[in-house]
Image (spheres, rainbow, N blue to C red):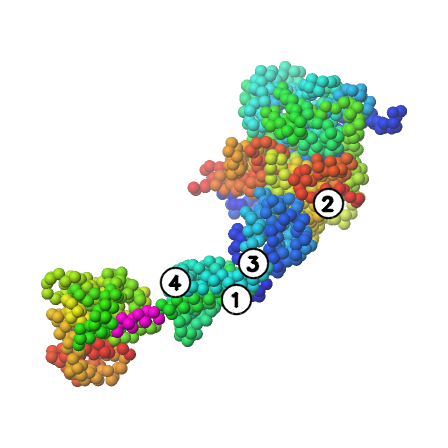
Amino acid sequence: MSGSTVTLGRLLATGLLRGHEVLGGAAGLDRAVRMVVPGGSVHAVEDLAPGSVVVFGPEQLTLDLPGADLALRLAHGAGLAGIIAQRPGAAVPLATRRLADRLAVPLVVLDEIAPAAVAAAFDPYVRAPEIAGLRILGTTAQRFQVPSSDAGRLTRTLAQTLGGPVALVDAESRFVAGDPAVRDLMDRPEVRSHLTAARPAAGTFEVGDGDAVLVQPVQLDPDAPANFWLAARLQTVTGALLEPIRQSMAIAALSYTAYVARTTASLERAGRRRSLLLGELLDPGDAPSSRAVERATALGWRLAGRHTAVQVAVRPGSAVLRPGEPVADLDERLAAHGMPMGLVERPDGWVLWVTTDSSGTAADGPGPAAAAVRDAVREALLSVEADRPGLRLCAGIGGTRDGLAGLRASLEEARRGCLLAGTEDGPATVEHVDGVSMKRMLVGWYSSPALRSVAAEVLTPLIEADPHGELVRTLRGYLDRESSATDTAAALGVHRNTVMQRLERIRDLLPVDLDDPDDRIMVHLATRALGVAWDEAD
Amino acid sequence: MSAGRLPRIGIDLGPGPATAVLVGADGRIVARCARPGDPDDPAGTVRELLAGLRPPGGGPLRVVVSCPGPADLLGDPGVLDRVGVLRIGAPATTGVPPLTGWPTDLAGAVCGPVAVVGGGYLHDGSEIAPLDIGAIGAFARRCAGPVAAGPVAAVAVAAVSGHLDPGHEQRAAAVLGAVLGPDVPVVTAHGYGGVGLLERENTAVLDAALARRAGALTGALAAAAGPDAELFLMDGGGHVLGPDVAAAHPVLMVGARHATARAGTARLTGSPTLVVLDSRPDGLRIGGLDDGLVPDTGTFREVRGIRLAVRTDRVVHLRPDGDAGPAVLLERVRAGIVRVGAALGDAPVAVAGTPGPVPLPSEARRPADAEWAAAYGAATAEASATVDRLFRFADGSLAEGVRLARRAARDGAVRAGADPRRVRIGAVREMAMTYVPMPCVRLRVTATGPLVDPAGTGETW
Amino acid sequence: MRRTTGNTSTGHWRTEGWITEEDVDDVVGGAVVLGSGGGGDPYLPRQMLRAALRRHGPVRLVDAADLPPDSLVLPVLSAGTPSVLVEMFHGEQESARLRTLFETVAEGSCSAVLPVQLGAVNAIAPVVTAAQLGLPCVDADVMRRCLPMIEATLLTLAGLSASPVVVVDSRGTSAVLSADDAGTVSRLLRSAMPHMGLVALISAYRLTAAECARLAPRGGLTECVRIGRALRSAPVVGDPAALLAETGGRLLFSGVVRELVHRTTDGFPRGVVSIESDPPADRRGARMMRVDFQNENLVASADGVVAVTVPDVIDLIDRDTGAVLQTVDVVVGQQVHVVALPVDERWHRPGGYALAGPRAFGLDVDPVRVGPS
């Protein structure tokens, strides 16, 4: 990739001539090539401009006939940079190969040759790399005038324009669209360190066979890490072409940025309107205005019927770039599981509900509908978490209730269930809360200020001694697991002795006696209540 | 090069001193013995050399002798017996009768009954004419006598395209054998490969005319070697000849001594491609080997104007010259090295034999045991076969022809004594042909391999 | 050969002499030179001639002008494949059948045999035929070298047709081929050959002695003898100086054969011999000569510069043995001289080039003549 001079050696390295063989004159492969032209006849060679590579078809030059030697001589005299011709049926005589060596005129053979096609393929790279580059740029600009509507189309279009495979990866180099083989190039150490550098920037890396991989960040915020990377694998025909290609990728990246930004903005706008609408509907004071009901209906929200509410939240400390980031994915997965409504933002998470027709069935309760919803939500959460390591989600499911009032109640239960689920360890925790469950009682208790103050008081020595919360977590895990140090160690991923050592310390610090059943239940409740606020927080 | 466990003795009967070496299973020379050579009594010389070398306790061993064959003595027509010559090919080929172009003295010596009878084959394998059994019977009776001279010593039989189909030659030989009995050898020409009818016929006639002497030589050598010994002679390619083959085809022994010295030098130096300066009291022979084989010169050997079905060997023979001083001779040696080495790239130059009347250039390497090179070459000689013929194919597949050629070469080498598991088959060369309007190709390939030990000599597989 | 030449009362250049057994090696040796790398190996022709002369006695060489002007001459050619001919050569009976059939078809009586081309086999076959028929042989020919097409003759240049072509083989098969154009006759002949075992004696061109005297350049056989003698007289084996002096030829190149490329198109052996100059001090410094051949050597070029082309004669001479080589028998490693000899001036006219220039063989180079040494 050094310099911008095009040589026959570099042209051959592009792989555009599959199955070629250099029979002689290899010493001339690094001579500058000015143009690639189809050869009309052997004698026409001497009229070609110096630096030309001439391409002969079998009609114009047969390499085992004496004309081949003449062509080499004429090419040498005219200062040509090489001869490309079809491989003859018999071997090319030694005399011809030696003559090519002696004159340092590269002699390249192909099994099948179409001179015009070879010249057309090579010539743009050679005669005016800048023009070829402009052509690429122009095509790119034209094709990306309208922002790409999806990642698949983006990578396809860009690959066609650049003439090499392209991939789109996310901030963690996960494959999004395009050619997976290009994605794999992101694992090369030098590429990886470039992608994780503080300030994202375009980069070019040699990956062997004369190929290079070019990477281009897609950034919504120029000061933030890249949201995506575009990567392309290309032949380094000439340094002169790399710059236009880089610019083409920047155009494509910009186009995709525009799409992402517009989508995000419209989503946010729509989301805000939906939250306001929901707030109005849930306001316990008045009956909703007819206009609000109308808008809800327009959005496809059902207010009549039996509702089962779902609230989803991101656990604090989860690895998310933007708070609303998982919503789109969640919407998609939930819709796939029969909940197409779309999440609506609330102060402490997102909600949706599923509605069945009222048909005078049994009383409120966790019927089959609720159980099915719980399973579906859990699966949806799990699949989103699986795609985004570091993201932790939790959800609550409310009871199944009738009418708008029932929806309000179910939503409240879902909120509390979500709160409860946030107290538990493990992936995609989902809690179902309805009027008769024991958990409902606990939720009320957890959310009571009196208990919270007691809990805070009881656990204060542990929190002061260990602001990271390890001691509280260890204590809660120990009590959750029926005082088994072994199970606790397994759950926390630490050695049993570590658990034993921490328990020693906890016993010293706590103002109560863990061996006393009353104290013990008090402390257990306190750790769980505290978890709502403190769990995983640091 | 390791060739089983049989002790091997190689013998070179000169010119110059007769030498012999005993070679162990590891290919190293175990013992050496030399005697003044006696061209008139090769068997006696062999007996003396073996007495000096034979491992104590007796037991089986292999004896390979490189010696002048009767064909080397063609300057004297007395070596030739009177033979019958039968050509099968009429009505074609009658324009050039057998023995045309032979020197008068040699033709007179060999010339018994001659006949050109109907038969032979066209290029496509069909018969030129039906085999004329009646004419062959008449010819056989002429060969048997009652001419005053008595029966011929042997009969040579050559048929047009016999190398493609030996059928007519074999049927004729059967008729001749029935009439003449077992004491008159019948030499057929089809085994010499595809060259030309005259070349094969000439070779068969010479072989027939020398058969009695050759049989006497191999018989005497076998007696000298003793019943425990497996006897071989050497051919002009530096490979072994079984005594029966040598007796029937003594022409194959032409050039054997120099080829054997070259093969031995190649193994002593570890260079299968080299130029060898074979120095003997009668002069210096410069010859080459190309990957262990005598390089093809593209021409046939002619002995006193008689062209034979064996290839010439590019050998420069320098004799002491009363007018030429050492400097002039040395210049000729260097020119000879260039000439022989031209086909061999930058081949190393090595010396074999003992210092003779022709000076040697200082750059030539003299390996240890150079004076035993010929005997060593005999002791370590391998069996070989070359196929050079037209392959026709019904479906026009070159690959099939190549496969057949390789198999034929391998089979030939195995028949010549090579160990089937260790036969090496050389590159198959496609030879140019003048205009032939059918799918066929002329292929040439050589297969070579170490000799297989006879059964019961301790091999354990 | 007793040969007298001189200005006689008629003012013609006359040849009178005999070809005897003593001339065999020379006439064949010279014919090989004119074969230009083709025309067959000389061993068999030597034996053919020797056997015929031994059986039938010497052959008288005549000048066509001394024959009855209206009598026919019998042009004779051995058609076929040299590699098959060495296996199944001619019998004794073809000559008489050829003459009978030709005289019937051509409606005339032959007073002498006429060689058509000069190559090892085809300079000899007419002499052998003459011996077998008891006819004299005209010391002339209509090609002055060896070319692979029956129509490539000076007679064609003079406007004569090759038809009728009469073909006989040793087994009694015969054919008469006739067509308006030479190409058709050639194709018919080629398709007939397999049925004749690829070996046949043929005659072509209906030609009277007077036409022969007018059109056929004289002295072809005697020139063969002269060239053969010159070759034999070389003081050092393989030294071409005497040959070049006799023929006005030129030494083009000396070197070692490094590669042979063969390919067979339409049945003819074509190929390229690559020869590296000696001494090859270093690879870059060595020059390369290529000799393109199709049966005969056609173009010799050194490092891409064409040195000599057909119709002039190009020969490879083995420097070890002095033998003038058949190009199909050349092997890698052989040390050779490449020499070129001029041919009859008539070949160097546009019509000659059209019939026997390099482009007639599909080689797109301009004809180059043997220049001064």
- How crowded is the residue under tag 2: few (<14 C-alpha within 10 Å), some, or many (20+)? many
Q: Chain of mark 3?
A: A
Question: Same chain for marks 1 and 3?
Answer: yes
**Which residue is tagged 1?**
A243
Measured as percent of width and height from the top left, residue B181 is found at 56, 20
The one nearer the camera, A488 or A433, is A433
Are dots 3 and 2 in contact, CB under 8 Å? no
Badge number at residue C307: 2
Residue A503 visible in the shown view: no
* Residue A167 lies within the magenta run: no
Q: Which residues are magenta?
A: A265-276
The one nearer the camera, A157 or A536, is A157
Residue A66, placed above or below residue A453:
above
- How crowded is the residue under tag 1: few (<14 C-alpha within 10 Å), some, or many (20+)? some
Measured as percent of width and height from the top left, residue A54 is found at 61, 53
Q: Magenta part mainly helix, strand or loop?
A: helix
User: What amino acid does circle 4 point to?
Assistant: Ser
Residue B50, placed above or below residue C62:
below
Give the label, 4 or 2, closer to the camera: 4
Give the label, 3 or 2, closer to the camera: 3
For the C terminus of chain B, the quadrant is top left
Measured as percent of width and height from the top left, residue C95 is found at 69, 21
Give the label, 4 or 3, closer to the camera: 4
Question: Same chain for marks 4 and 2?
Answer: no
